[in-house]
Image (cartoon, helix red, strand yellow):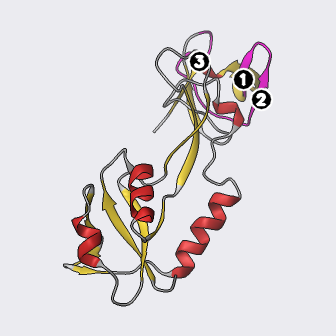
Amino acid sequence: MKGEWYAARVETGRERAMEMALRSRGFEAMMLVRRIWARRSRRAKARELVERSLLPGYLFVRMGPGGDWRGLCAMRGVFGIVGVGGVVRPVPEAKIKALREMGATGAFTAPAHHRDMAAGREVNPKDRVEILGGAFDGAVVVVEEIFVRPAGTFARVPVNIFGRETVTEIGVENLALVG
């Protein structure tokens, strides 16, 4: 299909269903996804890699010249097309291509070491964190490395012991991100 891409504002949490509905009506639609570690339900114990919308509440829709704007905006769950000053603006093809390539390379996929971390407390190398509890309680350090062992997920961090910097391993559950 020829035409330009536009960002459509859709019902949040229903992006996948809206993408399918748009396609069934003849529109070319695309939802960008991110893959995160989450439980499928509250009762599930294990976290698994699940897909979520990268841009909640938005889809990209390709419209050709003379496209069915009214039909698109009249669909239940579509709230409008993103624009500036009341004028819709297309998303450049180069940006769409770059986003697709990033998604294909796994740029929007959470690293494996996030699987055992509490939601909202995912720690990565080079993050500034505060140590919670123990002899180094309250110390703010920079994570050097994250690694997984059978006993859990750990971070290597430098701490000051008797005036000398020493790298130690601390469980990620004992770390909190510092703004």
- The kind of residue tagged 2 is Phe
Relative horizontal placement of residue 163, taking residue 68 as reference (left or right): right
Look at the image and say whether residue 11 sits in the magenta stretch.
no
Q: Quadrant of residue 5?
A: bottom left
Say above or below: 104 vs 114. below
User: Who's the residue at 53% across and 75% down the image?
Assistant: 95
Answer with mark 2 or mark 1, whichever residue precedes in sequence.
2
Q: Which residues are magenta?
A: 134-155
Answer with mark 3 or mark 2, whichever residue precedes in sequence.
2
Query: Can the viewer see residue 162 in this picture?
Result: no
**Residue receiving disc 1:** 154
Residue 41 versus residue 73: which sits nearer the camera? 73
Whole-percent x and y of residue 28?
A: 47, 71
**Image quarter of the C terminus:** top left
Gap between marks 1 and 3 measured at Cα? 9 Å
Residue 52 versus residue 145: which sits nearer the camera? 52
- The kind of residue tagged 1 is Phe
Pointer 2 with pointer 1, Cβ within 8 A: yes
Looking at the rendered structure, the secondary structure element under dot 2 is strand
Whole-percent x and y of residue 50?
A: 58, 37
User: Who's the residue at 34% across and 83% down the image?
Assistant: 67
Gap between marks 3 and 2 measured at Cα? 15 Å
Residue 147, disc? 2
Say above or below: 10 vs 142. below
Relative horizontal placement of residue 66, taking residue 102 as reference (left or right): left
How dense is the environment of label 2, judged by Cα within 10 Å: few (below 14), some, or many (20 and up)?
some
Whole-percent x and y of residue 47?
A: 60, 25
Relative horizontal placement of residue 8, taking residue 46 as reference (left or right): left
Looking at the rendered structure, the secondary structure element under dot 3 is helix
- The kind of residue tagged 3 is Asn
Q: Residue furthest top?
A: 134
**Residue receiving disc 3:** 174
